[in-house]
Image: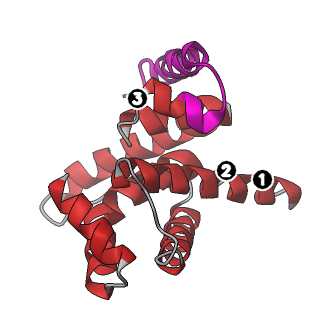
Amino acid sequence: MLEDEWLKLQFKAGSGAALRRIYQKYRDFLLTLAMGLLNDSHLAEDVLHDVFVTFAQSANGFGVRGSLRSYLATCVANRAKDRLRGRKRQASRLETDAEVASDHDGPDTRTIATEQSRLVSAALGQLPYEQREAVALHLNAGLTFRQIARHQRISTSTAKGRYRYGLKKLRSTLNGRL
């Protein structure tokens, strides 16, 4: 957290190195979050880049007092929600293919991981967006239910309920498939 405070100060002062470090530090985390919300790797990358372009342009007026990680996660969640609204207007459907592979795994391990990832992505895609967002923000972004409630403009108990119902539906959908 001390590094984040230093990075925020340097970024506000216009440091390109600070922006690069913030991007490097949070890129994978934010991409995972976006993928969990959107179930589309290309759209998730677009959202991540949109967030960082907007973030880079905000250096002069930047004033986050809390966690940089939570701030960026909220920005990704908001941009993902905007993208989903736009896609609904265009009447297109979300893709449910996601690839997870590691150079250190053998082909069998990669095949199993890819299949499991595809099943989880498909199950996440079946959840109502509010539940999917609550699950992703809590599990992937580490946001508290209070932070999720503020983000979604709902009560804390409703945020907990969305999370709980989302997990219950995921378990039900994935039961016996993994």
Amino acid type of the residue that numbered disc 3 sits on in the rendered structure: Thr
Displayed quadrant of residue 68:
bottom left
Displayed quadrant of residue 150:
top right
**Which is nearer the eye, 103 or 83?**
83
Residue 167 in the magenta stretch? The answer is yes
Decide whether the magenta segment is chiefly helix, strand or loop: helix
Asked whether the viewer can see residue 26, the reply is yes
Q: CA distance from mark 3 to mark 2?
A: 19 Å
At which x and y percent is residue 167? 48, 20
At which x and y percent is residue 11? 34, 76
Amino acid type of the residue that numbered disc 2 sits on in the rendered structure: Lys
Numbered disc 1: secondary structure: helix
- Say whether residue 176 is left or right of residue 101: right
- Say whether residue 128 is left or right of residue 24: right
Q: Nearer the viewer, mark 1 or mark 3?
A: 3
Q: Which residue is mark 2?
A: 81
* Magenta stretch, residue numbers: 149-178
- Are the residues at dot 1 and dot 2 in contact (C-beta closer than 8 Å)? yes
Q: Which residue is mark 3?
A: 144
At which x and y percent is residue 7? 26, 69
Say which label, 1 or 3, has the lower sequence index: 1
Picture disc at residue 85:
1
